[in-house]
Image: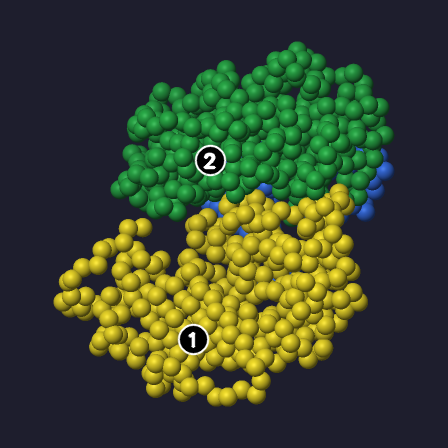
Chain colours: A blue, B yellow, C green
């Protein structure tokens, strides 16, 4: 357990818990995700989504730290973000 | 699904419904004739069908012929990027094309579940007509049966196609050699993801669209440019993985691909990650896998990328001497990891 | 994809592997208790890559695998009822029951609906008041907020046709049980990153002290897995036994407070039968009395049919890490994903399935070399 995927919050749809929800994008796909456990996130934040609900917010500063704990990595050369060479936009 | 027992009651309804196909439409009488003349013929209009004979009389061809048949039972009938009608045409056309034939004529056999709305049938027929036109084939003969509710899942279609051989059939996987290069002609997993997401009602917005398309132009271009093709397959059920495993089994070699090189659209990528399904195992309907001798991939890619349907063709791997695994994928660690064979239709998961 | 691709960077993986090799002066035994991590370790070949310095053993981290046979049988019975829609995660469909699985029931005309979220099952119930909708609620702590929210939503919408068939399990009691086993050889743990995201990881501090084992909260991508293993090895080499977080981009020590409130409102801790392992005290969750009207076991009666587990299946030994799947004599012979003897061979996160899918080259080498 458990398959949970990061997605970006792009639009709030409902604020009333337990129905609180927002439109979240995952790569090229979007779904309305329940936000009852994450009511204080902002648009543009990334949340971790499991079984249709957001269970945490991804902390970008903490996310970057994984590389800071390793010595010889040059962060400026590190690609952070979508890999573009094989992901193609056909439409 | 329970099947209604046959009964002796007259299948012609007291006041015939115009909006649905009924058992009476399949009984061969007036209603059948109306269905054909008012719905089917106008959609598919051509000189072969006009006579409504029991068989189509076809002109002689210069060379040998090829024939292929396939049946289509997709659910739902309509999905992003296509429907059962276009699928039925493209599937058979592509099977002929990859076998070295120019597709010419197809038959259209339909088994319709009682109660199918006439408008639905009409949409499917329009789609068949459009796909046939786009593929350069004529629907020359057909058959329609209506079965009781529950005996079919709305609509089943069989298409059988005949084409003229214009090039030798590619040798096939038994001719594969180590160092042959593996190419895929477009992004993978679109059809299966589109159908599965629609069918299961998974409530995603911006779904992937099926890649269902005729591949005749691409195959023709490979022939024109004299690209030496060792093996070529339409990657359908079981996805790219199924083709690779089949080729590995026949050739007794190992097929090695690079995960980073696999072309995947953002929609399929997103759905794969969220549902935990590997696109490599997911069905395609307009994507070829081919193997060419070492050194030929440059020309092959140039040829394919000049055709609209295969503009995203990519070199994805090589054929190698047989190692412990039939198919291997190089992943993040740089190790070549065995790729498992597909087991049934992939199911969404949360674990 | 953001926050995914970065953690699959080959350069980073290679460097983490080099660091682990540099640090380790002996071979350490580390267990992960999360099927998603088992899957990742096998898929990327991390277990093979580090075999000489780390012995990775796989714990009972697959909630699908440990769902009691009785619950699977109940689910298949419910799915055969004309008045019921059995909604389930796709994971459960191929898990063998005593006589059949949910996929077979669906093929036979049973009403089995795959859903991505339990909240979709609530929607189905609202749109089909003529049907009783039962959601098969399996999963570790990660999934419990979603099923608990389903109860809250059904309550707010005054639904009288929505039920949960609950089989939620808790990780820590299973870890306690494993450490109490007399042949236990685990020296360190990778903490289940998403379980900790929901439930926090403060609860592991006493566990770490009592058993003198490091517990490193770890994610699922190759960089995350390697970072977790690196920290675990670092502690073991230094004689430390601390709880440490290597998944800090999502997991906080206190977990998700809001989620925990919702879970605590709907569920209470109970003893739970784990398939293959027996009953684990405090190992599961059940619906609180106030939500009894949503409990499928109270609404429907289970038929009294024999519960038949394969006598050949050694899933208990696999789930507790005592054997690796490839040591089971039935592995890939009489037990395959097409005809499994038990759940770990069909669950996406089952250790047996992971070995079958990703380690088929290993199965052709001799077993002692691999252990």
Is C198 rendered above or below residue B199? above
B209 or B85: nearer the eye?
B85
Q: Tell me residue A23's x, y (percent).
A: 51, 47
Q: Which residue is mark 2?
A: C96
> Residue A51, how many percent across, how many down?
50, 39
Counting from the top left corner in percent of width and height, residue C113 is at: 40, 44
Q: Which quarter of the figure has residue C252?
A: top right
Residue C86 is left or right of residue B267, and the answer is left
Q: Which mark is residue B182?
A: none
Q: Residues at badges 1 and 2 in contact (C-beta under 8 Å)?
A: no
At 48% from the left and 40% from the top, the residue drawn is C94
Q: Residues within 10 Å of mark 1 (few under 14, many from 20)?
A: some
> Compared to C253, does B66 lie above or below?
below
In 3D space, how far apart are the residues under numbered discs 1 and 2 (Cα atoms)? Answer: 43 Å
Question: Which image quadrant is residue B290 in?
Answer: bottom right
- Does residue C16 lie above or below B238 as drawn? above
The 10 Å Cα crowd at callout 2, few under 14, some 14 to 19, many 20 or more, is many
Q: Residue at 77% of width from left, 69% of height from top?
A: B296
C364 sits to left or right of C65 = right
**Mark 2 element type:** loop
Residue B3 is drawn in which quadrant? bottom left
Element class at badge 1: strand
Can I make out residue C101 in this image?
Answer: yes
Subunit under mark 2: C
What label sits on residue B107 in the rendered view?
1
Label 1 resides on the chain identified as B
Direction top: furthest residue: C210
User: Residue at the location (67% across, 77% down)?
Assistant: B223
Quadrant position of the C terminus of chain C in the picture: top right
Determine if residue C269 is in view.
Answer: no
């Amino acid at each position: 357990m458990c398959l949970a995927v990061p997605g970006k919050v792009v639009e709030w749809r409902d604020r009333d818990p337990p129905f609180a929800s927002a439109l979240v994008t995952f790569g090229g796909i979007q779904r309305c995700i329940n936000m009852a456990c994450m009511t204080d996130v902002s648009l543009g934040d990334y949340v971790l989504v499991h079984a249709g609900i957001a269970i945490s917010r991804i902390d970008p500063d903490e996310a970057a730290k994984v590389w800071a704990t390793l010595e010889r990595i040059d962060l400026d050369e590190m690609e952070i973000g979508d890999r573009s060479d094989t992901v193609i936009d056909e439409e | 699904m329970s099947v209604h027992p046959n009964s002796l009651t007259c299948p012609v309804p007291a006041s015939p419904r115009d909006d649905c196909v009924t058992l009476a439409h399949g009984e061969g009488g007036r209603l059948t004739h109306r269905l054909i003349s008012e719905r089917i013929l106008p959609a598919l209009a051509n000189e072969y069908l006009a006579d409504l004979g029991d068989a189509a009389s076809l002109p002689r061809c210069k060379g040998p012929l090829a024939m292929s048949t396939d049946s289509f039972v997709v659910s739902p009938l309509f999905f992003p990027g296509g429907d059962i009608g276009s699928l039925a045409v493209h599937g058979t056309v592509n099977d002929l094309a990859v076998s070295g034939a120019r597709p010419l004529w197809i038959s259209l056999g339909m088994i319709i579940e009682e109660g199918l709305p006439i408008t639905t049938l009409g949409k499917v027929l329009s789609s068949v007509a459009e796909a046939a036109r786009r593929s350069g084939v004529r629907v020359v003969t057909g058959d329609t049966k209506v079965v009781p509710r529950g005996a079919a899942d709305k609509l089943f279609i069989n298409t059988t196609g005949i084409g003229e051989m214009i090039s030798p059939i590619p040798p096939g996987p038994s001719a594969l050699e180590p160092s042959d290069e593996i190419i895929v002609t477009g992004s993978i997993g679109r059809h299966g993801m589109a159908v599965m997401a629609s069918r299961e009602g998974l409530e995603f917005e911006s779904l992937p669209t099926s890649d269902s398309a005729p591949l005749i132009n691409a195959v023709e271009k490979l022939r024109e440019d004299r690209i030496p093709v060792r093996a070529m397959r339409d990657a359908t059920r079981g996805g790219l993985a199924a083709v690779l495993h089949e080729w590995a089994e026949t050739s007794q070699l190992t097929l090695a691909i690079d995960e980073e090189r696999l072309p995947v659209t953002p929609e399929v990528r997103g759905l794969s990650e969220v549902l935990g399904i590997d696109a490599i195992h997911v069905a395609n309907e307009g994507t070829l896998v081919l193997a060419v001798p070492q050194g030929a991939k440059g020309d092959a890619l140039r040829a394919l990328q000049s055709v609209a349907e295969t503009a995203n063709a990519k070199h994805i791997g090589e054929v190698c001497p047989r190692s412990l695994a039939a198919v291997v994928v190089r992943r993040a660690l740089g190790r070549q990891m065995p790729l498992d064979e597909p087991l049934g239709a992939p199911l969404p998961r949360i674990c | 994809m953001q926050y995914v691709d970065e953690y699959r960077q080959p350069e980073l993986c290679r460097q983490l592997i080099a660091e682990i090799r540099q640090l380790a002066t002996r071979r350490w035994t580390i267990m992960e208790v999360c099927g998603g991590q088992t899957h990742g370790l096998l898929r990327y070949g991390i277990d093979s890559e580090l075999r000489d310095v780390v012995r990775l053993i796989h714990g009972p981290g697959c909630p699908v695998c440990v769902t009691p046979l009785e619950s699977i049988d109940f689910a298949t019975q419910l799915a055969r009822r004309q008045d019921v829609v059995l909604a389930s995660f796709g994971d459960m469909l191929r898990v063998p029951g005593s006589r059949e699985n949910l996929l077979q029931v669906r093929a036979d005309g049973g009403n089995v609906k795959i859903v991505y979220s339990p909240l979709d099952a609530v929607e189905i119930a609202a749109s089909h008041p003529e049907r009783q909708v039962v959601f098969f609620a399996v999963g570790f702590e990660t999934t419990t907020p979603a099923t608990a929210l389903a109860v809250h939503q059904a309550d707010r919408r005054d639904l009288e046709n929505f039920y949960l068939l609950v089989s939620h399990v808790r990780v820590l009691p299973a870890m306690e049980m494993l450490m109490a086993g007399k042949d236990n050889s685990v020296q360190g743990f990778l903490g289940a990153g998403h379980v900790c995201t929901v439930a926090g990881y403060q609860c592991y501090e006493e566990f770490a002290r009592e058993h003198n084992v490091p517990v490193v909260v770890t994610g699922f991508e190759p960089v995350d897995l390697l970072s977790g293993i690196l920290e675990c090895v670092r502690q073991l080499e230094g004689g430390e036994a601390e709880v440490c977080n290597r998944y800090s981009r999502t997991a906080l020590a206190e977990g998700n407070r809001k989620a925990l409130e919702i879970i605590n409102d709907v569920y209470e801790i109970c003893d739970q039968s784990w398939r293959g392992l027996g009953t684990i005290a405090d190992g599961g969750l059940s619906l609180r009395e106030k939500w009894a009207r949503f409990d499928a076991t109270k609404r429907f009666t289970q038929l009294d049919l024999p519960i038949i587990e394969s006598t050949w299946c050694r899933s208990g030994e696999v789930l507790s890490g005592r054997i690796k799947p490839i040591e089971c004599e039935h592995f890939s012979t009489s037990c395959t994903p097409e005809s499994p003897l038990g759940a770990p061979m069909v669950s996406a996160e089952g250790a047996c399935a992971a070995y079958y899918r990703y380690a088929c080259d290993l199965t052709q080498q001799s077993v002692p070399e691999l252990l």
